[in-house]
Amino acid sequence: MIILKVGGSAISNKITGESHISEVADILCEELPKDEKLIIVVGAGYIGHKIAKENLLFKIDNNQNKWALLRYKVNENAQYLIGKLIDAGYAPIEMSTSSLLKLNNNSIESFDYKLVESYANLGFIPVLHSDAPINISGGISILSGDVIASELALKLNADLLIFGTDVDGIINKQKLISKISKSDAMKIEYWDNKDLTGGMKNKIIEVKRLKNTAIRIINIRKKGMLSNAIKRLEVGTFIE
Ligand SMILES: Nc1ncnc2c1ncn2[C@@H]1O[C@H](COP(=O)(O)OP(=O)(O)O)[C@@H](O)[C@H]1O
Ligand SMILES: [Mg+2]
């Protein structure tokens, strides 16, 4: 089982808003396997971050319209990729994280990941996206795609988790790190790219709990990196 996170940074420039979703869709249609179980999690990207920041979406406060807009826009990106993948002969199906999962403060209270697995077992590609599910401690909360992807990798014992981003992997002193342990990855210097849910550092924190999953961070906009990662070849940064 492969879990692929298609990062918000990959589909759009979070600062300028420039969209790259069509080039990412082309790469997915070209490079995704047709003979392996796969789940895709799509990040929020520019529009999700913009709506959340402009409307200070931390709690429900007569701003339900903005929360609804946020959910609509992140879903729209996922739908776009689903449409392209269907045209290319794949069988992606949308699954709403908000309908499968509840939060309790910052942790996952419940997640019907078995339902996601059932579709993957039937030959579909479940496509989830970063979302804003119910938080039983009050209201709804932003949930990053990194958390969803890592949780699925853990619970479904995925053998590979790929983070597709706009950088070639973890960069240290301007050089790409090809392999790093989870604990050493925590010590790297991460710059602030204004990502609402913790950026690259958050990915490292999230994957710390994975024991049996190979983790790779790649640039999903560079042709060939995704297919090489899927072939388990050395590409991007491998986190062991
Ligand atoms: N040391 C680092 N190596 C690589 N990328 C880094 C580093 N520190 C910060 N980043 C930033 O992390 C970003 C990827 O994290 P994030 O924006 O959360 O991606 P995504 O939207 O794909 O989840 C990169 O675009 C890069 O700007
Ligand atoms: Mg992010």
Image (cartoon, rainbow, N blue to C red):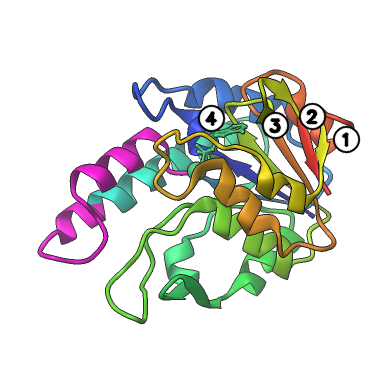
Per the model, the C-alpha gap separating discs 4 and 2 is 16 Å
**Dot in front, 4 or 1:** 4
Eye-nearest disc, 3 or 2: 3
Position in image of residue 103 (x %, y %): 44, 74
Residues under labels 4 and 3: Cα distance?
10 Å
Span colored in magenta: 43-68
Q: Local crowd at mark 3 within 10 Å, few (<14), some, or many (≥20)?
A: many
The amino acid type found where label 2 is placed reads: Ser
Amino acid type, label 4? Ala
Tell me which label, 3 or 2, sits earlier in the chain.
3
Nearer-the-camera pick, 140 or 207:
207
Q: Is mark 1 on a helix, strand or loop?
A: loop
Question: Could you give the CA–CA distance between mark 4 and mark 1, rounded to whole angstroms?
Answer: 21 Å
The image shows residue 26, relative to residue 199, as above or below, that is above
- Of 63 and 121, the residue lying toward us: 63
Taking the image as drawn, is residue 1 in sight?
Answer: yes
- The quadrant in which residue 18 appears is top left
**Three-letter amino acid code at disc 3?**
Ile
Q: Which residue is drawn at 57% across and 27% down?
A: 166
Q: Please name which of the two marks, 4 or 2, marks the residue nearer to the observer.
A: 4
Find out whether residue 12 is within the magenta segment: no
The reply to whether the C-beta atoms of the residues labelled 2 and 1 are less than 8 Å apart is yes
Instruction: Count the numbered circles shown.
Output: 4
Contact between labelled residues 3 and 4, with CB atoms less than 8 Å apart: no
Farthest residue to the left: give it: 62
Horizontally, residue 143 falls left or right of residue 128, namely left
Question: Would you say the beta carbon of the disc 4 residue lies within 8 angstroms of ligand 1?
Answer: yes
Report x, y in % for residue 137: 34, 81
Give the SS element for disc 2.
helix
Residue hosting label 4: 10
The residue at 48%/22% (across/down) is 20
